[in-house]
Image: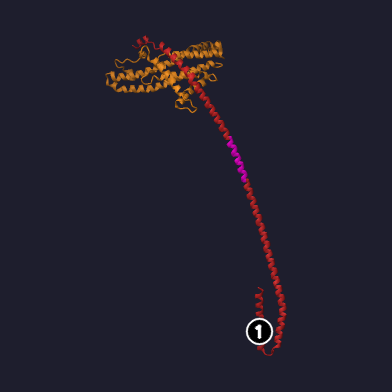
Amino acid sequence: MTTTATAPAPGFESPGVEDFQLPPVFGTVTKPVLELVLAAIIIVAFFLVAVRKPALVPGKTQFLGEAFHGIVRNSIARDMIGGREFLKYVPFLTALFAFILVNNLFGIIPIIQFPTFAHPGVPYALAGLVYVVFTYAGIRKHGFGGYIRLSTWPPDVPWWVRIILTPIEFLSNLILRPVTLSLRLFGNMFAGHLLLLLFTLGGEYMLFEAGDWQLKVLSPFAFLMAIVFTFFEAFVQVIQAYIFVMLTASYIGTVLADDH
Amino acid sequence: MSTLAAEELNPLVPHLAEIIVGLVAFGLLVWILAKTVFPQFEKMYAERTDQIEGGLKRAESAQAEAAALKKRYEDQLAGARDEAARIRDDARSEGQQIKAELRTEAEDEAARIRARAEEQVVALRESAERSLRGEIGGLSAELAERILGSELADPSRRSATVDSFLSELDAMALRQTTGAS
């Protein structure tokens, strides 16, 4: 990276937004669209195999499926939502986690190598869906007025604090939640993919296109960094999927809470 | 040139096709999983919890039973030990009693034997004295008769007479003792 940044070789064009505009694979169908369908198929297939022969002492696939479901159920939904209501949201949260996780991991799976959510459309859609889910849950529990009061009117606050606090609460709880949720996911995937592109394309340029022999010698470091950042991306992709679901559960939990 | 590209291609602008496909795919995913897979999982958890709780309860009762059994065995063992000790004490005292009885019996027997032996000795002496007293008179008379009847003057004859008398007397005494024993 330092090599290309401090002394950019003439002719190297660093990857940018245009690299995210993928040509259609066939017809008008693009790679991310295929990835979305593939992810759904993979997840459904995996879980159907997991419950094919249900047994009290589970086999390997069943164990994996139950473990995945159990993580979302017990350490996300139960902790963040609690009560008896959390069970209702477990299927949505588990499917959400699996869907985001698989789509993110597409970013480092060979041949596919594009994180679906480096395009913002589906993150927007999922965040909108989450917004609908927790707003509906809040209104059903507290009524429309109750829900608005819960989201903007924290109890036991002096009036002069409330002048500042209520607009902030209104903005953050009712408007910005889906925005931050979707942009966090999109931004991480976008940036991660850009980093990998930079190291891979840069290394390729140094090795094959640059005339200097020094750049050819140094090019393995660019590839090494690409590999290191692939591992880092794997970590980020899992973490981002987890954070998305965790925050969703937390939003549902706060709107179902009895007081602020 | 990248600023130019960014103006043309804003990365924040979504692709409509992706939104539609994403929502449909995700919707189907949630629907299928919620209908088929996750109820199975929940059922499995419930069954497993049930089994484990049942197992724990069974284990608890088995443990209690084992504890009761152990206590009973220990009680029995303690009883047996007490009984053994009692039997041993009994046997010891009985043995001592028997020993004491035997000793007194033996002592009595010994005393009785000794007394009888003494009595016999006394009786033998008395009878010996009695027979000797009677005989001594006779013997003295006979000896005197012999001495007087023979030649008193002849000292050699006199001594021979005394010798023969004494030897006769010896033979008689020997016969009497062999006959008595």
Quadrant holding the C terminus of chain A:
top right
Q: How is the image coloured?
A: by chain
Query: B62 or A167, which lies in front?
Result: B62
Direction front: furthest residue: A53
Q: Does A86 sit above or below residue B170?
A: above
Q: Secondary structure at mark 1?
A: helix
- Rendered image quadrant of residue B139: bottom right
Q: Main secondary structure of the magenta part?
A: helix
Region in magenta = B64-81
Percent x, y for residue A52? 46, 24
Split into 4 quadrants, where in the image is the N terminus of chain A? top left
Residue A200 visible in the snapshot? yes
* Image position of A207 (left or right of B99): left
Q: Nearer the viewer, residue A144 or A173?
A: A144
The residue depicted at 64 percent of the width and 52 percent of the height is: B92
> Is B68 covered by the magenta stretch?
yes
- Is residue A84 located in the magenta-colored stretch of the structure? no
Give the labeled residue for mark 1: B164
**Residue drawn at (57%, 35%) of the image:** B63
Q: x, y percentage for residue B23?
A: 44, 14
Q: Chain of mark 1?
A: B
x, y percent for residue A218 = 31, 22
Residue A161 appears in the picture as rendered: no
Query: Which residue type carries mark 1?
Result: Ser
Residue A98 in the image: above or below residue B6: below
Percent position (x, y) of residue B73? 60, 41
Closer-to-camera residue (B70/B5) = B70
Q: Give the left or right position of residue B36, taking residue A195 as reference.
A: right
Check the rendered structure and report the hue given to chain B. red
Q: Residue A103 sits in which quadrant?
A: top left
Q: Which chain is orange?
A: A
- Going by the image, does A100 lie left or right of A162? left
